Amino acid sequence: MKYSFSILILIVAINYFDSSNGQNKPDRMTIKTSIPENPVVSIKNDIYNPNAVNKHKEYTPDQNSHPKLTQLNKDVFGIDAIQTLIQNGNEQYLGHSIVTERTGSVPGTIWVVAGVRSSTPGADEVRIYRSGGSDWLFKIAIPFGGYLGYDIDAELIEHSSGAKYLWFVVERSESLLSNVEVFYGIHELGTSNGWFGKLNWPGAGSGDNYYNPRITTDNYDFPDDPWIYVVSSLDSLTFDNKHVYAQKFAYITSPYDLGNMQINYRINILPVYWPNGGTTEYHYLFSDIAYYRLSPAPGNVRLIISYSNVPDYTKIWMSTCESGGSNAQFLGTIAGHDNYKIGKSALTSPGGGLSSQLMVVFEENYLNSGDWDLVSARSNDVGSTWLLNYIDLSSSTTDKLPHLGTLVSRKGVEDEYYLSYASYTLGISVDSIMSTKSNNNSTSYWDQKVKMNDIYPPSYVSSSVGITNTPDERVTVWSSLIGSSNFYLIGSFWPHLPSAVEDESEEALNSYQLYQNYPNPFNPVTTIRYSIPEISNVTLKVYDVLGNEVATLLNEEKPYGSYDVEFDASGLSSGIYFYKLQAGSLVEAKKMVLMK
């Protein structure tokens, strides 16, 4: 069993659940984070606590030099990919992320999570789409309200029980002038259910902005007990208006059991940060997170966290901590070529399989002249040494400037990474969206680029990449303004997407089904869902533990379909209750818990 400091937060249920009646889990403790004011970068390691119960033991990596290679991967275009339009409209599609199902009836099914700037100010939402073979199916819209940012990242929890939950993190601000915060969202696959909530970082101050959130999971190694891990960049203003740049860490237990899941926070910032950025100096930290295992014993997970574009912008900075956030250590840095400036960066690992491989991709400014290139750094020893390769090498300060999209890996498989990015002509247009795959060649590590679009959008483009169930197959998605008013979310298949089946909820309509209520436990409102395959007389009643009927929620004839019934227990006392459905050939009861 795992024990940890935890702060439980309000889960706001949406779509089928009224947000005003969600289960309220108040903070147990509020601790003010203290950040020392030093004029230079401060690197601090935690003192190892042998009593801390985590998934991993203490680990201190070596910090060796980083060998460099100069073999160039020249600009070679592949064939155009097949294009499909996911969605279009007058709203602006912001950042997006792609996840892939590994298990179930159709492994390789792709899901796209996209932030949308609503045409109604302050009413932004996240929309989720699923691949349907040769097209896309719109599945759910989660209305966050306020204003979403461009950063969004997602992971898919596939529990051994068959339950699947799509988790994502996104930036959100209440207004265009208010602080940026990090929110999470959840979509239960096979249903129309969605939830969202706010990450309540301990020690947060009035001048703090939390942004650029990234998420990862150890689900591949722990299908029975996966955790989710989140890192967020932090920009905090001190009393004298100086910027503090740092990172915060959170982990979520039982993300497959929303009635019992907990959000836990590392109290202190991670060990690499800039306490003093100056009164006028501003930097946007690009953070990322990945996990790995060093031992086949149960647990033994450790997190790698990176960030770039800090005051010392010639390096990518790395730290590591245990699964519960303890024993955080400074891991080292990745230096590019000849101290050139490094911009945006991305981090991933194969995870699982006791792999010690890490992959980082970053934008590098050649001679600090404005000529940006795309470079990868691969480590086979968990960050002790790094091997550099060019991915996209431009030869001009104005032509084909790379803009990094997303980097993903196939879990449990080394040397299989997929990358998306946009290629810009500065001040004119976006030339193209690229997609490329890695290989295990030491001198030319990346395959030739595949040009994913045959149009030339005239504005900023966001891109992301995902993989299907077969090596060498991928899908790249990008969003862009086309013409004067329409924003598009476009998908490119390479070379194709797998066939897809209807959702479990749609398949379930072929039989009578009663589902577990949610939330459970609840206070005081919960929702009960059922499905019937034909017109039927339906009775739904609630009983106490003594068998006394306390409520009749439904007693009427209903046509074929899936239904949600809200139960308000305001007049009942805390305790265990049962709800019973009688419909057609089905007579079934389930337990629920009221906690006031």
Image: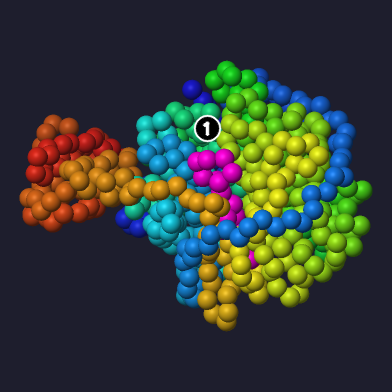
Going by the picture, which residue comes out furthest to the top? Answer: 297
Relative to the observer, which residue lies in front, 34 or 398? 398
In magenta, the rendered stretch is 461-477
Q: Is residue 89 left or right of residue 201?
A: left
Residue at image coords 82%, 64% = 280
Amino acid type assigned to the residue bearing label 1 in the image: Tyr
- Residue 476 within the segment the image draws in magenta: yes
Decide: is 294 above or below 135: above
What's the residue at 12%, 55% (across, down)? Answer: 558
Write down the quadrant of residue 140 in the picture: bottom left
In x, y percent, where is residue 525?
A: 28, 50
Looking at the picture, does residue 209 appear above or below residue 429? Answer: above
Residue under the point 24% across and 45% down: 508
Q: Is residue 575 found left or right of 345 in the rendered image?
A: left
- State the image coordinates of residue 424 (x, y, percent, origin top left): 73, 66
Q: Position of residue 102 (x, y in %)?
A: 47, 38
Q: Judge the density around disc 1: few (<14), some (14-19), many (≥20) Cα neighbours within 10 Å.
A: some
Please identify the quadrant where the C terminus is shown. Answer: top left
| Residue 545 placement, left or right of 295 | left
Q: Position of residue 341 (x, y in %)?
A: 85, 54
- Name which quarter of the figure residue 318 lies in: top right
Question: Which colour scheme appears in the figure?
Answer: rainbow
